[in-house]
Image (cartoon, rainbow, N blue to C red):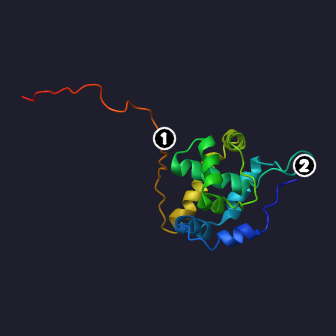
Amino acid sequence: MKQKLSSPSFADLFLGQRKVKQTFFLQINTVIDWAPIRAIIEVAYTKGYKSTGRPSYDSLVLFKIELLRTWYGLSDGEVEDQVNDRLSFSRFVGLGMEDIVPDSTTVCRFRNILVEADLYDTLLAEFNRQLEAKGIIVKRGAIVDASITNTPRRPRGRKSYEVV
């Protein structure tokens, strides 16, 4: 059984009133016809059609997470964290506040299924074909992650160098 995408919750409705920069993601969701992409994915990704086990994630949710991973140069773990953390990312992939974000292992397995079935490049080609037909170019971005590094409080001694 596939995991159903839930209806918007009260939290989603309240968050919808917040101003979130989502122009790019809204444009992508508007111009892309997801039906051919879903058809390509479901040639190999047949999870969710069994009555036993945990419900699997919708194939488009996983593909959109893979797009985010590719566009922003993120690892599987980083894209999981970003979809959990960033409202614009979770809205783009189609997850509400109450939905559980696929973990990094699920993202990795999904990509491996597509690669082993020789569909990964086909999917990206279809996606890019649709973008090019609309005159849209996607450039890679970067998410800068701040980190704290321990350093000495001040230099131990002053050194001067003569420049000749």
106 in relation to 29, above or below: above
Q: Position of residue 56 (x, y in %)?
A: 81, 50
Residue at image point 68% right, 58% down? 37
Number of residues whose C-alpha sits closer than 10 Å to that of mark 2, classed few (under 14), some (14–19) or many (20 or more): few
Q: Position of residue 46 (x, y in %)?
A: 81, 49
Which amino acid is tagged 1? Answer: Ser
Which amino acid is tagged 2? Answer: Lys
Q: Position of residue 50 (x, y in %)?
A: 90, 49
Q: What residue would you read off at disc 1? A: 147
Tell me if I can see residue 123 in this picture.
no
Q: Quadrant of the C terminus?
A: top left
Front of the two marks 1 and 2: 1
Q: Nearer the viewer, residue 19 or 155?
A: 155
State how many labels appear.
2
Tell me if I can see residue 102 in this picture.
yes
- Mark 1: which secondary structure? loop
Q: Which residue is at the far bottom? A: 17
Q: Report which quarter residue 91 is drawn in.
A: bottom right
Q: Is residue 5 left or right of residue 63?
A: right
Mark number displayed over residue 50? 2
Residue at image point 52% right, 45% down? 73
Q: Nearer the viewer, residue 15 or 90?
A: 15
- Mark 2: which secondary structure? loop
Residue at image point 55% right, 58% down? 128
